[in-house]
Amino acid sequence: FVPRLRFMMEAVAISRLMEPEVEVERTVSMDVSKSGMYLATQGEYERDELLLIWIVEVPTDESIRVRVRRRVPWGEAMQVPGIGVEIMDIPEVALLKLERLLR
């Protein structure tokens, strides 16, 4: 069991792993844990798609690699549209900063 916090991080940037030169989408997180988060977005991301994210509150020069595990489109389930992502690879420095924020 990984505790999740209703913790909003103000700025998260998303980029497709295979197209990092494509414009980056700015968003916010709706909840966060050490293993993943829910990101508010209307982007057309697919389940199991790999993405790169950068979190302003967790500054690091390296991106965090995540996998889309769930997508909620606009107007479905009376929920904020977005994606649930699992953290696949996170730099040690970023992990320590994230853990500190989650305390």
Image (spheres, rainbow, N blue to C red):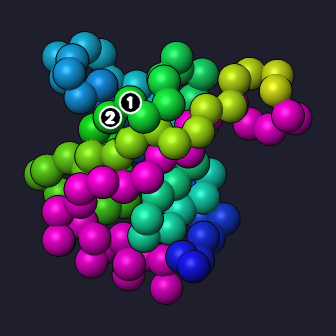
Number of marks in the rendered image: 2
What residue lies at 48% left-to-right and 24% top-to-bottom?
Answer: 46
**Left or right for 80, reference 48:** right
| Disc 1 secondary structure class | loop
* Above or below 8: residue 92: below
Q: Residue at x 62, y 51 (%)?
A: 30
Is 30 in the magenta?
Answer: no
Separation of marks 1 and 2 at Cα, in angstroms: 4 Å
Q: Residue at x 49, y 85 (%)?
A: 103
Instruction: Identify the image quadrant of residue 84.
Output: top right
Left or right: residue 72 compared with residue 22: right
- Residue sitting at 82 percent across and 22 percent down? 75
Left or right, 84 with respect to 76, comes to: left
* Mark 2: secondary structure: strand
Q: Quarter-wise, where is residue 1 in the image? A: bottom right
Dot 2 amino acid type: Leu
Label 2 neighbourhood size at 10 Å, few (<14), some (14-19), many (20+)?
many
Left/right placement of residue 50 relative to residue 79 reads: left
Residue 60's disc is none
Disc 1 packing (10 Å; few <14; some 14–19; many ≥20): some
Q: Position of residue 81 (x, y in %)?
A: 69, 31
Look at the picture and state if 15 lies above or below 64. above
Examine the structure image and report whether residue 89 is included in the region drawn in magenta.
yes
User: Are the residues flagged by discs 1 and 2 in contact, CB closer than 8 Å?
Assistant: yes
Segment colored magenta: 77-103
Q: Which residue is mark 2?
A: 50
In this rendering, does residue 10 appear at all? Answer: no
**In this view, 66 is above or below 78:** below
